[in-house]
Amino acid sequence: MSQDWVIKSRAHACAISGEPFTDGATIYSTLNRGGEGFERLDICEAHWPDAPRDGIVSFWRTVYQAPPPPAQEPLKKETVETLLRQYMSREDYSRINVVYILTVMLERKRVLIERDVQRKDDGSKLRIYEHKQTGEIFTVPDPELRLDQLEDVQKEVNELLGIGMPAAAAIATAAPAAPENPPASNEPSPAG
């Protein structure tokens, strides 16, 4: 019978008392034959003497290991792109290093493709990217970061993206309210 092979994984609470198991606690697992096939029951050590023995095919003593915490969700491309668009639409050049790193992150994910690098009259670089799916053009000033600046910029980007922060704090940090009338600027902005 195919249903004989369907056996549940270890439970996280005692089948008798319903109390959750603690990490490292001794528990007993039983394999019982019931009307619907095999059934697994996990029982805490305190309730093992009172556990029914009818229908037990096998049992074993084991140590409960709590499941690891859920893996941190991988960084979503939409989050990086959304944050980049927010800063570029506000023409917030106080965070030019962050804007540049977000752009590079999207380039590595193959969302943006660098199309050109131009030198401005003052000698600074202007990088031109194309959004692979939408065809939008992003012009991003290159802050020409030095290696000794990267760690601080990485920390700032991680904070803005909410890596290692509660979600509400991340949103508040990453998305400050845009001014109603942003100041005019001569700096480039994304073209759509």
Image (cartoon, grey):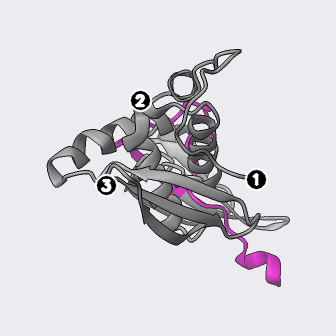
- Our reading of the magenta stretch's main secondary structure is loop
Q: Nearer the viewer, residue 131 or 35?
A: 131
In percent of the image, x 38 and y 53: which residue is there? 121
Q: Is residue 85 visible?
A: yes
Q: Amino acid at mark 3?
A: Gly
Residue indicated by mark 1: 192
Q: Nearer the viewer, mark 1 or mark 3?
A: 3
Q: Which residues are magenta?
A: 1-29
Q: Label 1 neighbourhood size at 10 Å, few (<14), some (14-19), many (20+)?
A: few
Q: Is residue 26 magenta?
A: yes
Q: Is residue 114 above or below residue 8?
A: below
Residue 35 percent location from the top left of the image: 85, 64
Q: Nearer the viewer, residue 132 or 162?
A: 132
Residue indicated by mark 3: 123
Q: Label 3 neighbourhood size at 10 Å, few (<14), some (14-19), many (20+)?
A: few
Of the numbered discs 1 and 3, the one sitting upstream in the chain is 3
Mark 2 to mark 1 CA distance (whole Å): 23 Å
Q: Is residue 3 above or below residue 186?
A: below
Q: Label 2 neighbourhood size at 10 Å, few (<14), some (14-19), many (20+)?
A: few
Find residue 94 and name its label.
Answer: 2
Q: Is residue 164 visible?
A: no
Query: Image check: 33 left or right of 140?
Result: right
Q: Which element carries disc 1, helix, strand or loop?
A: loop
Residue 190 percent location from the top left of the image: 64, 49
Residue 149 picture quarter: top left
Residue 145 percent location from the top left of the image: 26, 51
Confirm or deny contact between disc 2 and disc 3 (CB under 8 A): no
Q: Which element carries disc 3, helix, strand or loop?
A: loop
